[in-house]
Amino acid sequence: MLCGNFSESREKRLKLEDVDGSAFMKALDVCRGRKDCREVALGELPLLASVADRFQMTEVTSVLEEALMGKLNVDMGTCWRGADGVGCNSWRQTPWRWR
């Protein structure tokens, strides 16, 4: 879009439709490697993942994956595995408690 014969490639500004501005800026900061953006709050994960997927920001996806992996614990693993009679349906009905 920015490098071909698209009209956007000739413009100085690019208007992005249906994108949360703060999430996009945070995704750009993560993509550029800003050290203060390496920590991602769990509440930001879905929105940042959506922006990263839409604009194919693989660096952002890697940071989000690391953030999520850092929050996993044994209780969650047991639940996802279905051990102790706990399946995903009952897991979805219980509130999350992050440790």
Image: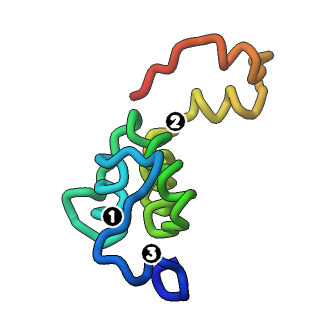
Tag 2 residue: 73
Residue 90: x %, y % from top left: 72, 13
- Local crowd at mark 1 within 10 Å, few (<14), some, or many (≥20)? some
Q: Check residue 28 in the rendering and tell me which mark sits there, or answer none.
A: 1
Q: Up-down: is 84 above or below 42?
A: above
Q: Give residue 53's quadrant in the image.
A: bottom right
Name the residue located 52 percent from the left edge and 77 percent from the top edge: 1
Q: Is residue 28 left or right of residue 65?
A: left
Q: Check residue 45 in the rendering and tell me which mark sits there, or answer none.
A: none
Q: Up-down: is 12 above or below 39?
A: below
Cα distance between the residues tagged 1 and 2: 29 Å
Q: Nearer the viewer, mark 3 or mark 2?
A: 3
Q: Give residue 38's quadrant in the image.
A: bottom left
Q: Check residue 8 in the rendering and tell me which mark sits there, or answer none.
A: 3
Query: Which amino acid type corresponds to the residue marked 2 in the rendered image?
Result: Asn
Name the residue located 54 percent from the left edge and 88 percent from the top edge: 4
- Local crowd at mark 2 within 10 Å, few (<14), some, or many (≥20)? few
Residue 32: x %, y % from top left: 30, 72
Viewer-proximal residue among 41 and 6:
6
Viewer-proximal residue among 63 and 6:
6
Q: Are marks 3 and 1 in contact (CB under 8 Å)?
A: no
Label 2 sits on a secondary structure element that is: loop
Q: Are marks 3 and 2 in contact (CB under 8 Å)?
A: no
Q: Which of marks 3 and 1 is in front?
A: 3
Cα distance between the residues tagged 3 and 1: 19 Å
